[in-house]
Amino acid sequence: MHISHPARRTSDLALFKAMLAQLIVSGLATGSLYALLALGLVIVYKTSNVLNFAQGEMAMVSTFVAFTFLETLQMPYLWAFLLAIVASFLFGAAIEVALLRPATNPTPLGLIIVTLGVQQVLYGAAGWIWGYDTKTFPSPLSDTKIYRLGRVVLSEVNLWILTASIILMVALLLFFRYTRVGVAMRAISQNPTTARLMGTRTPWVLSLTWAIASVLGAVAGMLIAPITFLDPNMMLNPLLKAFAAATLGGMNSLAGAVVGGGSLGILENLVGGYLTPELKDSVAFFVIILVLCLRPSGLMGRHYRRRV
Amino acid sequence: MLRISNIETSYGPIRAINGVSLEVPEGRIVTLLGGNGAGKSTILKTISGLLEDQPDKGTIEFMGTRLNGLDPEQIVRLGITHVQEGRTIFEELTVEENLLMGAYVRRDVHGVQRDRARVLGHFPVLGQRLNQRAGTLSGGEQQMLVIGRGLMAHPRLMLLDEPSLGLAPAMVKEIFQIIKTINEEGTTILLVEQNARMALQVAHYGYLLEAGRIVLSDDARALSENEDVRDAYLGIAVEGSPKGFKRYKKKKRWR
């Protein structure tokens, strides 16, 4: 058969489009994991004004807990998943109560150092308990089973990453918009003194934000573990990406964290696909530097005045 | 209803309140007058528990319960709402959400709905802005929102700090009219004001505070006829600064 020139051009274009779509969709899946971690960072930052460097290690520990449920106790996956979420909720709250709350007259810097300490302790403890060797995280989701959406291909793992992230984000949105405690959390982040006068029990609400952040991390960790494998270092890279995503989004905006995570994931994948895979991991840092130079409050951040 | 006996409050080493006693009977509007830095707001903050470990000395009693040492979140549950100075709204929340925050401690859904309707009756303009972010309201509207939010707790005692601060004269009149109505509907009010003229018009009783001490107290009418008060507080607005020096001398005499 004779193939005419224009036809070949259109097929090139179609190929280009398909590849672009593919890179975007799989980038979005990775990005939604960054977004989950970034959301955890943002809600803690908004309510307690602390950059939580332990967010990644908290997620790592929760993932190891899920691993213990699955491997040592041989629980079915769904049960292990749900129990790990409950455990991470309590774990997050416990860290706030035990380590951050006792700080008297805390400065933001002092609290950041505390979170760094928590991060180191968790890292060491995880290595001590579970060992530093890399483990395979058993998961019912297959990395090789593939779904087709038009021309785009999506592995089962990625499909679930996207689904779970979206469900969690919507749940979080509804929580902050429509529940009494959710609205109170937003109020506290804007004006803690006035919120106390309304009767909010500020310390408990703070613990709750840590608990929620911990759950977000746990879900991200359990979703990412089948891909990256399991070891105490697993969250190092994702957490740095999450910081970049949160900075890009504006650090104090929930929507910003989602948009920042998504766009960072896509950007990474495009750089990896079209430029060179070597630069893929550096993208996050270019993003941080660029954002801080050009638009310090991020894409969607709003720095409103804090009243004393 | 509220009885304060001989309280002393300090910010660190600096003593702001020096043995103040005052009483707010149920159903009344009592006003606390005084210049800048006299300690009016400090007294309100001491009552509502915002100043940790304060008062140093003395007791605060509300309907038989001692408030000393309670947290603000406990005190608000006893029925005391502190409406702070300035427009301390939650800017990023909508007007509706701000109002709901005011009713945070309440569980009676129907009562909250009734009070919401009552607040929107007092401040119809808020009703038109329910889904707007509170930060976009004008200054006067924000002040209305702060008072409305305070009412949402259905307080027995409302501590009102400078509700007229920075408002246009017409708005000041409106706000004070509403304060009077709120009181007639059954809320007891302790009102802190720099605008002595307006405050004495709505209040039943008044205390005059100077440098952390009560120097004068009387019925609101008697106070507004008192020569010293007229000169020092009611006069300023009309006669301006030339009287300033004389006012200073008079203040000295009270101590």
Image (tube, rainbow, N blue to C red):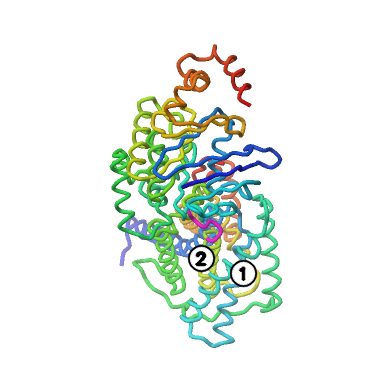
Q: Residues within 10 Å of mark 1 (few under 14, many from 20)?
A: many
Where does the image place residue A16, in percent across and percent down from the top left?
41, 58
C-alpha separation, residue under disc 2 versus residue under disc 1: 16 Å
Q: Residue at x 40, y 48 (%)?
A: B98
- Residue A234: numbered disc: 1
Taking the image as shown, residue B240 lies to the left or right of residue B131, namely right
Q: Which residues are magenta?
A: A199-204
A200 part of magenta stretch: yes
Residue A19 visible? The answer is no
In depth, the one of A6 and B218 nearer the eye is B218
Q: Quadrant of the C terminus of chain B?
A: top right
Where does the image place residue A124, in percent across and percent down from the top left?
71, 71
Chain under disc 2: A
* Mark closer to the chain start, 2 or 1: 2
Query: Relative to residue A303, is residue A224 depicted above or below?
Result: below
Residue B2 visible? The answer is yes
Q: Residue at x 43, y 61 (%)?
A: A172
Taking the image as shown, residue B118 lies to the left or right of residue B67, namely left
Amino acid tagged 1:
Met
In depth, the one of A237 and A286 nearer the eye is A237
B98 part of magenta stretch: no
Name the element at disc 2: helix
Which tag is nearer the camera, tag 2 or tag 1? Answer: 2
Identify the residue under disc 2: A216
Where does the image place residue B238, in percent across and percent down from the top left?
45, 16
Where does the image place residue B65, in percent across and percent down from the top left?
52, 55
Query: Relative to residue A145, is residue B118 depicted above or below?
Result: above
Name the element at disc 1: loop
Chain under disc 1: A
Amino acid tagged 2:
Leu
